[in-house]
C-alpha cells in the first residue's frame, strides 16, 4: 500500500500543475485574509493614515480590478504563446524529448501560478463590491494588494521573456542537461560500491542460484524500482530479487520482468504492492536514469549534424560536455547490489553498463559525423581523454579500443581528402601517448 501511495504522490509532485495549484490556493487564502484585514482595527488605522492609497467608490474599484484582470489575462496568453513557439523550435532544432521541459520547469510553473493566482485574487475582490454598500465596505486594502500583484505580473512577464529567450540557446540547453546529469552522477558516486566488486559478485550470485521468473503485469517503459520496498519483502521471505530488464527498456506485458531465488507466495494485496514497486511511465527523467542525460546530449548533437541544420560546431560543443560526464561515469557506477539490514544481498538490478552507454551515445555521433573531420577529431579527443583517466585501472580499455577502431574505419571510408586524413592521423598518433593502452600499431596508423 505504501508503494502505491508513494507512486501517486510522485505522480502529483511531477505534474506540471503542481506548483500552479499551490500558488493559486495561496492566492485564494490571501484574498480571504485581505477581506478580513479590511475590517480589522489595523486596517481601519491604515486607511486613516494613508487615505491617498484608498479607493473611494465602487465604480473606480471595479474599473481597477477589471483592468487588472484583463491585463493579466493578456500577459498570460502572450507568455504561454511564447512557450508554445519555443517548444516548437526546441522540437525542430534539438529534440522532441526536450520540448516538454519548458512547461514542466519550475520557473514556467511559478509564473503561470502567479498569473492565475493574481486573476483569482482580483475576481474574489470584485465579487465583494456592490453599489449599495458603504464606502468603508469596499475592499480598499485588497485592491491595493491587487494593484501590487498587477505590477508584479508585469515584472514576472519581463523576467519570463528573458528566461524563455535564453532557455532556447544551445549553450543553456546543453549546459542544463550536463549539470543535472553531473549532479546525479556525483550523488551516485557517494553511495555506489566499487565497479570491480559489483561485477564479480553479481556474476557469482546469478550463477549460484536457480531463479524463478515473474512476468510484467503491464506494457511500458521500465524506469525504476523502489529498492526499499523490494529489499523489505526479500528480507521477509529470505530471498533475492533480480531484475531481468535494463532500466529504460520497453517491457511488453507477459514478458519477464524480475526473478527470485524461490517461488513467492503472496495474497492479492501483497502482489499489488509488489508490482507497485516497479515504475512504468513515458518520459526521460534524468534523476531516474542517468542514461537519458547522455542520450539527450547525443541527440542534440545528431540533430545539429542533420542536413537541415548543418551545425557541426554545436555537435562538437555537445561532445565536449560528454567528456566530463563520461569522466564522472568512469569513477563510479550505479549499484548493482542492494543489501538488507542483515547485510545480505537482497536485490540485483540491471543499470546500463558503461559499454552499452558508450555505444548507444557515441555510435550515432560517429555514424552521422563520419564525413566531418572536426567531429571525428573531437571523438578521437574524447577517447584520448578517457583513456588517460583510465590509464591505471584499465577497466574500459576494450570499450575504448573498439570504438577507436570503428572511428578510424568510418573516417577511412568517408573522408577522401588527404589533408583531412592527415589531421585525423596526427590525432591518432597523439592517442599513442597513453602508452600500452591502445592495440593499434604504427603500421595500422600509417595505412589510415
Image (cartoon, rainbow, N blue to C red):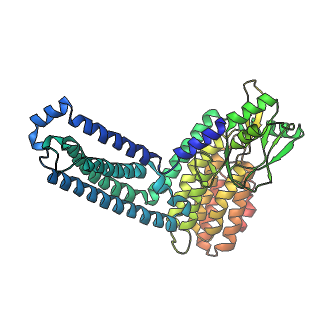
Query: Which residue does the image show at 64% across and 76% down from the upper left?
Result: 416
Query: Which residue does the image show at 14% across and 43% down from the upper left?
Result: 134
Image height of 132 relative to 100, above or below: above
Query: Which residue does the image show at 61% across and 39% down from the upper left?
Result: 5
- At which x and y percent is residue 316? 53, 61
Tally the numbered discs. Answer: 0
- At which x and y percent is residue 211? 87, 41
Q: Determine whether, in the image, residue 222 is placed left or right of residue 100.
A: right
List the single residue furthest toward the top.
Answer: 342
- At which x and y percent is residue 438? 72, 52
Image height of 92 relative to 39, above or below: below
306 or 350: which is nearer to us? 350
Q: Determine whether, in the image, residue 418 is placed left or right of residue 157.
A: right
Image quarter (top left, top right, bottom left or bottom right) of the N terminus: top right
> Residue 231 occupies which quadrant of the picture?
top right
List the single residue furthest toward the front.
Answer: 132
> Residue 370 occupies which quadrant of the picture?
bottom right
316 or 430: which is nearer to us? 316
Query: Is residue 177 visible to the viewer in this orientation of the structure?
Result: yes
Image height of 220 relative to 389, above or below: below
- At which x and y percent is residue 238? 82, 29
Q: Determine whether, in the image, residue 350 is placed left or right of residue 109.
A: right
> Residue 30 occupies which quadrant of the picture?
top left
Image quarter (top left, top right, bottom left or bottom right) of the C terminus: bottom right
133 or 158: which is nearer to us? 133
Query: Which residue does the image show at 29% across and 37% down from the upper left?
Result: 33
Query: Is residue 448 visible to the viewer in this orientation of the structure?
Result: no
Amino acid at each position: 500500500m505504501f508503494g502505491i501511495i508513494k507512486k501517486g504522490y510522485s505522480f502529483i509532485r511531477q505534474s506540471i500543475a503542481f506548483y500552479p495549484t499551490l500558488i493559486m490556493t495561496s492566492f485564494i487564502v490571501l484574498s480571504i485574509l485581505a477581506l478580513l484585514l479590511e475590517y480589522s482595527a489595523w486596517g481601519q488605522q491604515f486607511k486613516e493614515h494613508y487615505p491617498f492609497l484608498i479607493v473611494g467608490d465602487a465604480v473606480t474599484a471595479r474599473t481597477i480590478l477589471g483592468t487588472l484582470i484583463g491585463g493579466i489575462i493578456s500577459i498570460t496568453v502572450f507568455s504561454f504563446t511564447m512557450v508554445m513557439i519555443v517548444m516548437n523550435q526546441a522540437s525542430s532544432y534539438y529534440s522532441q524529448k526536450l520540448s516538454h521541459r519548458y512547461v514542466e520547469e519550475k520557473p514556467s510553473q511559478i509564473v503561470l501560478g502567479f498569473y492565475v493566482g493574481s486573476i483569482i485574487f482580483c475576481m474574489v475582490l470584485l465579487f465583494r463590491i456592490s453599489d449599495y454598500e458603504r464606502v468603508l465596505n469596499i475592499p480598499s486594502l485588497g485592491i491595493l494588494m491587487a494593484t501590487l500583484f498587477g505590477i508584479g505580473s508585469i515584472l514576472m512577464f519581463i523576467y519570463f521573456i528573458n528566461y524563455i529567450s535564453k532557455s532556447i540557446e544551445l549553450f543553456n540547453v546543453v549546459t542544463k542537461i550536463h549539470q543535472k546529469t553531473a549532479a546525479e552522477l556525483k550523488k551516485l558516486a557517494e553511495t555506489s560500491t566499487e565497479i570491480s566488486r559489483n561485477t564479480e559478485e553479481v556474476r557469482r550470485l546469478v550463477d549460484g542460484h536457480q531463479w524463478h521468473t515473474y512476468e510484467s503485469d503491464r506494457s511500458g517503459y521500465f524506469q525504476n524500482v523502489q529498492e526499499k520496498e523490494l529489499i523489505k519483502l526479500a528480507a521477509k521471505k529470505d530471498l533475492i530479487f533480480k531484475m531481468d530488464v535494463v532500466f529504460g527498456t520497453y517491457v511488453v506485458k507477459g514478458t519477464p520482468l524480475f526473478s527470485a531465488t524461490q517461488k513467492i507466495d503472496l495474497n492479492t494485496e501483497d502482489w499489488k504492492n509488489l508490482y507497485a514497486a516497479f515504475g512504468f511511465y513515458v518520459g526521460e527523467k534524468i534523476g531516474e536514469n542517468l542514461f537519458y542525460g547522455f542520450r539527450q546530449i547525443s541527440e542534440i548533437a545528431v540533430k545539429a549534424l542533420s542536413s537541415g541544420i548543418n551545425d557541426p560546431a554545436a555537435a562538437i560543443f555537445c561532445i565536449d560536455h560528454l567528456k566530463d560526464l563520461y569522466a564522472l561515469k568512469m569513477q563510479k557506477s550505479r549499484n548493482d547490489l542492494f543489501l538488507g539490514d542483515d547485510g545480505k544481498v537482497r536485490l540485483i538490478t540491471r543499470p546500463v553498463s558503461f559499454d552499452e552507454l558508450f555505444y548507444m551515445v557515441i555510435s550515432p555521433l560517429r555514424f552521422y559525423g563520419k564525413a566531418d573531420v572536426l567531429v571525428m577529431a573531437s571523438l578521437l579527443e574524447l577517447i584520448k581523454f578517457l583513456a588517460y583517466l583510465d590509464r591505471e585501472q584499465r577497466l574500459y580499455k576494450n570499450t575504448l579500443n573498439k570504438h577507436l577502431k570503428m572511428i578510424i574505419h568510418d573516417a577511412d571510408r568517408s573522408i577522401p581528402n588527404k589533408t583531412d586524413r592527415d589531421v585525423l592521423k596526427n590525432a591518432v598518433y597523439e592517442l599513442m601517448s597513453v602508452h600500452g593502452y591502445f592495440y593499434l600499431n604504427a603500421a595500422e596508423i600509417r595505412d589510415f
